[in-house]
Image: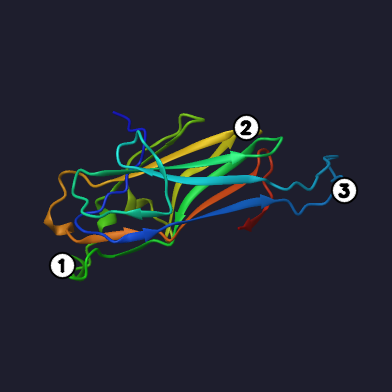
Amino acid sequence: MIKKRMTLSIVTLIGSVFLFVIASFAWFAVSNQTNSNGIVLENEDIDVSAVFYDSDDDISYSVATEIDFNNATPGDVKYYKLVVTNNNAFSINTQVFLYGYTNSYANEGGDVSNNAAGRKLATVTLLNASNNIDSVTIEDRNVHQELSDSKLITHDYVTIPANSTGEFYFSFTIPVTVGNDYGNLKFSFTNIYVSSFKAGWYVWKEKTY
């Protein structure tokens, strides 16, 4: 069965992890001159806003500034939603990714032997993701295998229509089969990035807020 969301669950006691939503909106540094193919390139600024939410049941969402996995156990699921508003008179392509991955033990006062043995919670955590615009989903993918240079892409260039809002869902799940080998472990990301550029354009610079 296809899951609609992606989950971020952590085994045992885990401290709060702060996620900073960074909107990296594209702006064009291109010439107004017509190129050799007769195509006129125009400068465009991108106006996009984003709000981050979390939920324990995938029904009721609250505005979030952190991810808190206190006393999570195998089988638990944590849900997240990023609402991105396109305030432009044109469609934009938007990518969402998590950045700044780290892993450690959850509670320094607990048993840290799993962390000392080099075990990583991300190796048993499943990622699911979807959005309310198209049918592209991520289904039960291993978080550790999806990581690249501390970066985890949750949504890859979803097109948000002009003056519209897109809802980007993701979640992390700890399978019920996970045992004591992954107790008192955690992983985190320092940032959520939203990168947008005008649909149909392929050259841009990123502007970070």
Q: Amino acid at mark 2?
A: Pro
Left or right, 2 with reference to 26: left
Q: Secondary structure at mark 1?
A: loop
Separation of residues labelled 1 and 3 (CA atoms): 64 Å
Q: Counting other residues with Cα less than 10 Å from the Cα at mark 1, is it few (<14), some (14-19), or many (20 or more)?
A: few
- What residue is shown with label 1? 110
Disc 2 from disc 3: Cα separation = 27 Å
Q: What residue is at 32 percent from the left and 54 percent from the top?
A: 68
Quick check: can you spot residue 127? no
Front-most of 136 and 110? 110
Judging by the rendered image, the residue that carries numbered circle 2 is 161
Tag 3: amino acid:
Gln
User: How far separated are the C-alphas under marks 2 and 1?
Assistant: 49 Å
Sequence order check, earlier mark of 2 and 1: 1
Circles 2 and 3 in contact, beta carbons < 8 Å = no
Q: Residue furthest left?
A: 180
Q: Which residue is mark 3?
A: 33
Few, some or many residues within 10 Å of mark 3 (<14, 14–19, 20+): few
Name the side, left or right, on which 90 lies relative to 190: right
Residue 86: x, y in percent? Answer: 62, 39
Task: Give the label on residue 151, or none.
Answer: none
Q: Amino acid at mark 1?
A: Gly
Marks 2, 3: nearer the viewer: 2
